[in-house]
Image (cartoon, rainbow, N blue to C red):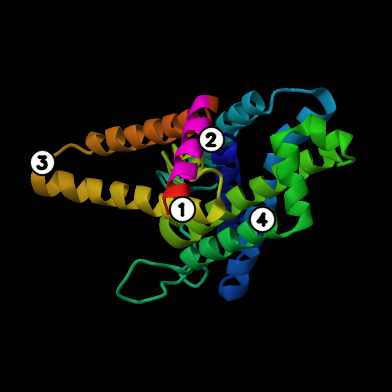
Amino acid sequence: LGGEGQFIMGSIATCWVATTWGIEGPGATLLCLLFGAVAGGLWGAIPGILKITRGLNEMIVSIMLNYVATLFMGLLYTSVLREGNVPQTAAVPDATQLQRIFPDLRVTWGVVIALAVAAVVQYFLFSTSKGFQLRAVGLNMTAAEFNGFSVKKYILYSFIVSGALAGLGGSVELLGTQYRLISGYAVGYGFDGVAMALIAQLNPVATVVVAYFFAVLRTGANTMQAGTGVPTSVIGIIQALVIVFAVAGTALVKLPHIRQWLSNHLEKKGEVK
């Protein structure tokens, strides 16, 4: 739930480096991406530290930090980093922006970064011992602690890494699409990410597929409204229905009697074969 604030902090760090350091080119792009990930990781560490040291609810802390990040961004583009009379920051230099993979398409190298990150997270979570231990801590902290896992360490690391990934996403968005901080930047991104992760059953690769589905809906909404007059709010309704049915379907399948029925049904099919 704190992904939006971490996303914004990554964008802020990227904008600061790109527009005030006076450096341009591929080296500056990599530096911006690094600073974005670090800023997001540090912002994500705050609720993690408060959880393991003071026992505070990470959801409440994360949501409050989203507002802090949004207001801090507003301070920057309206005063500290403001460009001229318009409430916005200076644009990222052309040489520092993420370039398009194909000149005729709007697809930048940010897509490649996102796919690479998803593949790395997928491999770590499901193909390494540390990933197994992290999933075990998430599923049952008490059982993990009795089995000798360092629960607090894994909790803190998960907050930092997830924050770094969100910050990297903010950096990619700023360098590849938005180019500057303005009013309304990144609104709703964090909760969209939560919805996509829920629909994808917390699987990194599946989340990429769901994110593409949401992107198609969002992009097609504007064209649909211009071409047919159908309001874009219809897309929001469709997305809400997808989330409701996905979560409800998952909850239904996990009911004991539903599981038993599915098991018996599969056994009968096996006997028939």
**Label whose residue precedes the other's in the sequence (4 or 2):** 2
Residue at point 23% right, 35% down? Answer: 234
The 10 Å Cα crowd at callout 1, few under 14, some 14 to 19, many 20 or more, is many
Mark identifier at residue 126: 4
In the displayed structure, 65 sits above or below 212; it is above
Q: Which residue is mark 1?
A: 180
The quadrant of the rendering that contains the N terminus is top right
Question: What amino acid type is highlighted by mark number 2?
Answer: Thr
Give the quarter of the image for residue 31.
bottom right
Question: What amino acid type is highlighted by mark number 4?
Answer: Phe
**Label whose residue precedes the other's in the sequence (4 or 1):** 4
**Residue 4 at x, y percent in the picture:** 54, 39
Determine the main secondary structure of the stretch shown in magenta: helix
**Label whose residue precedes the other's in the sequence (3 or 2):** 2
Q: Is residue 45 left or right of residue 228?
A: right
Mark 4 touching mark 3, by CB under 8 A? no
Q: Which residue is mark 2?
A: 70
The 10 Å Cα crowd at callout 4, few under 14, some 14 to 19, many 20 or more, is few
Tell me how far mark 3 sits from mark 1, CA to CA: 31 Å
Mark 2 touching mark 1, by CB under 8 A? no
Tell me how far mark 3 sits from mark 2, CA to CA: 33 Å
Mark identifier at residue 229: 3
Question: What amino acid type is highlighted by mark number 1?
Answer: Arg
